[in-house]
Image: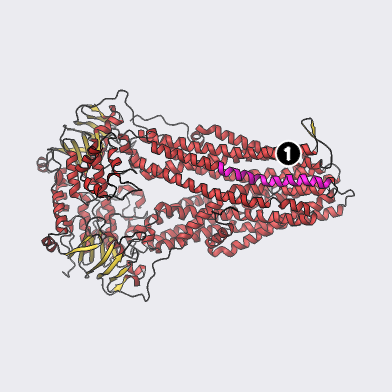
Amino acid sequence: MSRKSYTPFRELYRLALAAIGEKQANYKESVRWFIVTYIAQGIAFGLFYPLLKSIFAETPDTKKTLMLFGIMAAVTVLSLYAKWKGHGFDFSGNIVDIAHDMRTRLGVSLRRMPLEKLSTYKTGELNAIFSNNVEESGLTLGIITAMIVELIFVPLTMVVVTLFVDWRLALFMVVLFPLAIPLYDRIRNTNVAEKSAFNRANADLEAGFIEYIQGLPVLRAANRTGANEEKLQDAIKKARSTQVSGLYRTQIPYFLMGILIQAVLLLLLFFGAGFVLEDTLTLVTLAACITVVVRLVEPLSLFVAVINLFETTDIALGRINEVLEIEPLAVHEPADNSVGHDIRFDGVDFTYEGQSEKTIKNLSFHTPERTMTAIVGHSGCGKTTLTKLLMRYADVQQGSIRIGGVDIRYMTQEDLMSHFSMVFQDVYLFDDTVMNNIRMNNPNATDEEVKQAVRAAHCHEFIARLPEGYQTTIGDIGGSLSGGERQRISIARAILKDAPIVILDEPTAALDTESEVSVQQAIDKLVENRTVIVIAHRLSTIVGADRILVMDSGEIIEQGRHRELMALEGKYYAMWAAQQRAKAWSVVED
Amino acid sequence: MAARQESKNQGLWAITVPVKTHMAAGVVLAAVSGVLLIAGNVMLAQVVTIVAGGELAIFGLAFGFREAFWLLTGLIVLTYAIRGYSFIISHLGAFRLEEILRTDLTERLADMPLGYVISTGTGALKKVLLDDVKNLHAFVADSTPMIGKSVATPIASLVAMLLIDWRLALVAVGVLVLGMILMYAAMKDDATYRKQYEQSQSDINKAVIEFVQAMPVVRTFDDGTTSFKRYNLALERYRHHTKAWIELTALPGKIALIILSPLPTLLAVTAAGILFVTGGSLSLFGLMASLMVSTGMADTLMPLMWFNQALKKSNAAAERIQEIQGLPTLDKTEEPQIPERFDVTLEDVTFRYGEEDIYALKNVSFHVPENTTTALVGPSGAGKSTVARLIPRFWDVTEGSIRIGGVDVRDMTTETLMDTVSFVFQDTFLFNDTLAGNIRIAAPDASDEAVKAAAKAAQIHDFIMSLPHGYDTLAGDRGTNLSGGQKQRITIARAILRDAPVIVLDEATAFADPENEDEIVKALSNLLKQKTVIVIAHRLSTIKDVGQIVAFDHGEVTEKGRHDKLLALDGTYAALWKNYTLAQNWDVQHSGGAR
């Protein structure tokens, strides 16, 4: 038998059950109802043997005919009733509950997963898992379950019934069955192979489109647009040819699978005719047998049409489970409460997952409470990693990080995060009112407290200008808030949170000059009386720091106050000099 | 920019015109195979009746069992071959349409105002080119065979049944009609519920996107409690409305499933069959054939429901594709001209985006003599960036004109214009090519020496030489990761090699990555030598000495002149300068105490 590259059916069932979660019992019950439905249906079909025989008997026995019909009617009612009950599962909103449950569990996993893991997912990927993949799994449960049960139990019952009528007919019914297995194998294997070939072609195409769109200004200048950009046109053609060759390869097994049941019919007809001629089989029985087997044509062709849903479901469930299985960073016991807010890094080593080189090497420093520490260095030197580690983006491989004397691994996520306020270049505002956006870290703040924070962050003026003031929804005004205004809202949020440690990562780098001044004033308010860690490229903004850490390749190479570092005439001195030169540059014609 | 004629033909049917033959063939062949399948069933029943002897008459010819058997075999193989072919042809059509649309869209993008491409964004455009085009598949490839089959099978079944025994046909139709009546009676379409359900469906998607997108940022300022609450609330609302909708539709839905199952029809036909056979008016063939084809009529409903869904999805995709296809392209000049001087003149330039009411620029005029520098300054949104973008024709002016060396930019070919004007830092993008290739793209015929010279002038040569593969190092997604500053310097090398006489420079993006400012400054100085330069300035200290400063406010030029003159005016520029000095002198004022 050929090698299996697809997930076997049983495994898929196990995956589905795991994804269903709490509703497993209901789901299994519905499967049981479907089994009843289709066994009863098989029996009803099987009743055509005695019934037709009785109808077309030489001396018709009306009583017997009516009785058989009565049984058939009863079995039909049973089958329909069981079907009604079985579909009760999807028609009473269970699938909605399952999707709800999956999304909730996914949500919990997302907010608990280590940030390092989170950063390995692209936003689009997660979107697809949360919406499409969840829907796909639910869809399959609804559509496929009944279909598969039907395809297994109707033929099975029919064969058993036929066995009692004429074992030779039963034999011809199953003789081609072994052929179905390699065909099914072939279909699933080809599907998997085609899908990955298609995905590769699609990924190339995607990369090609991105390159084309982003590079359009350059490509236009080089007259390499449209049909002239051969690389892209090739990728487009490749996407088509991959699909075309895949189509031909998958069609043959599909065609054979579809025709298989017809072959069974022809076989029955051919040999049945022989038996009739040699008088070992009545014509009516053969007629009944063929009438019954014809019933399998439609469900089988439907099944063939949805086989590729298996792959879709397999992939969907796999992705969902992958997210669900990510473990949060463990909170070590016993959890401890910190005293004070000084920060201590002690011999910290850190390597990003999947990288071989350490990003942080044996790094130690101490920031006393209510002092300001600046971290400077070229991009890639590890300064942003340092602040990430402080928030437990991932666990360090060596050494420890302590806040107020307590190792951050002994703090719950909530407790740890309550220590920090952060102001970054990126500001995320929810599509909610301005008021709720400011209040989000401190839902119980009074209106008065919010207003104070807003004034401190220099937001009151522009908020007053908004159409509905504090009640204006961010989504309604969308792009009309400038970068500086968004930044000030985030600062008001931070002021209201009133956390003892403030982390600033290049908060003004992306702003224009006029916004910069008010953001600067807001920051001055935010950092008052707090422990401050600031990452800055523009050295002039941090000359007043109590301590400046100069980093290079994951290590602290110099530290001290501005004056001390200047006196050293080392790395800091060189950076300062370069910035002064750049500052003095002017665009003057020669 | 002349408004192009409104596209009249919209929607799925219009977009699939290039492959309509494929689609029609797909429908027809599927219908033929559907009819043949029914015919095959009837013939099967007929052949059964002659196994013990007798002949089958088809079109006046008589066939014995053996002959009829092989004829039937042939018919079945033909049926499935046609069905397979209808599937293949509709899929080929779909793949072909993908290629046609993608080629067309990439060509359109090339002729469109660059401003549109930039403001729409790579992500959104890529989605149309990749996903929306792919989403047409459901309509072109999957639904065509289904339509053919859904239409042909019920009709063929009905005709066959009428031919076999019209009374049994009536019984089968009767069951179907009764079922429909039941379904209709159970159907309660409540517009409010439906709306709520549809609304909650789009809400849940928004909620998911917000939750997922915000998470990396949110996690840095809270533990996710607030956003999780919002997400949960949306989930609950969705569950509530969906369940309400399901409750409403469950009954008719389940009734439909019961009727569509073969058993009720078979039972009714059997009952009538018993009656007629006993009465002597129905043969074994008649009953058998009727039982075989009677369920074909119910097959029509299910796939049609499917089709509706495919239609919805593909329709939305088609609309987005057509939106791009319908966008105006830049007018191409009939008599292209090539400028011989490189001074830049703006005369009464007025501009608004599309049909917006608000003018982004009003009557802007200024002149930049050849080989001089002009700085554009102003508060954000004043119009300085817009002016800069009009020069390389990212958009076309609404009124007025922009001329380089006396030639209107609209009278140049795209290539001439791009050779003339270089917009630095609008294109820090690196191609998936070698570093040398990335620089050389500006001038494909440039020698290795010229490429190296440009790299040296751009202060990036030493870095490139430090890489193991030097100039042959692959850049872009699949190659070396370069820092922002390094990418910028490659871009500057590209611009130096292109040697366009007019340079538009956005200083904000020039210094977006503050690393290695010093080297970028040197690189820029080399680039700007002997050029006509227009710079959108943010760091006002860099432009103190330029020949001309043009100050903007609310889309209008308020002041023109040198630094000292403008300061003395005490207007827009003086206010900007004051603010700038203030921001420059800031350092984080920390009053922590424990120093």
Position of B293 relative to A228 (above/below): below
Quadrant assignment, res B351: top left
Question: Could you tell me residue A547's position as x and y percent?
Answer: 18, 65
> Residue B122's x, y, as percent?
36, 44
Range covered by the magenta-colored residues: A248-276
In the picture, measured across the screen, residue B346 lies left or right of residue B31, that is left
Q: Which of A474 and B444 is in front in this view?
A: B444
Where is residue B487 shown, x and y percent of the image? 27, 46
Main secondary structure type of the part rendered in magenta: helix
Query: Is residue A339 or residue A186 the one in the foreground?
Result: A186
How many numbered marks are there? Answer: 1
- Residue A388 in view in this figure: yes
Task: Determine if residue B155 is in view.
Answer: no
- Residue B592, position as x, y percentages in the image: 19, 67
Q: Residues within 10 Å of mark 1 (few under 14, many from 20)?
A: some
- Name the residue beneath numbered marker 1: B72
Residue sitting farthest toward the front: B468
Q: Does the magenta stretch include residue A269?
A: yes
Farthest residue, direction right = A59
Image quadrant containing the C terminus of chain A: top left
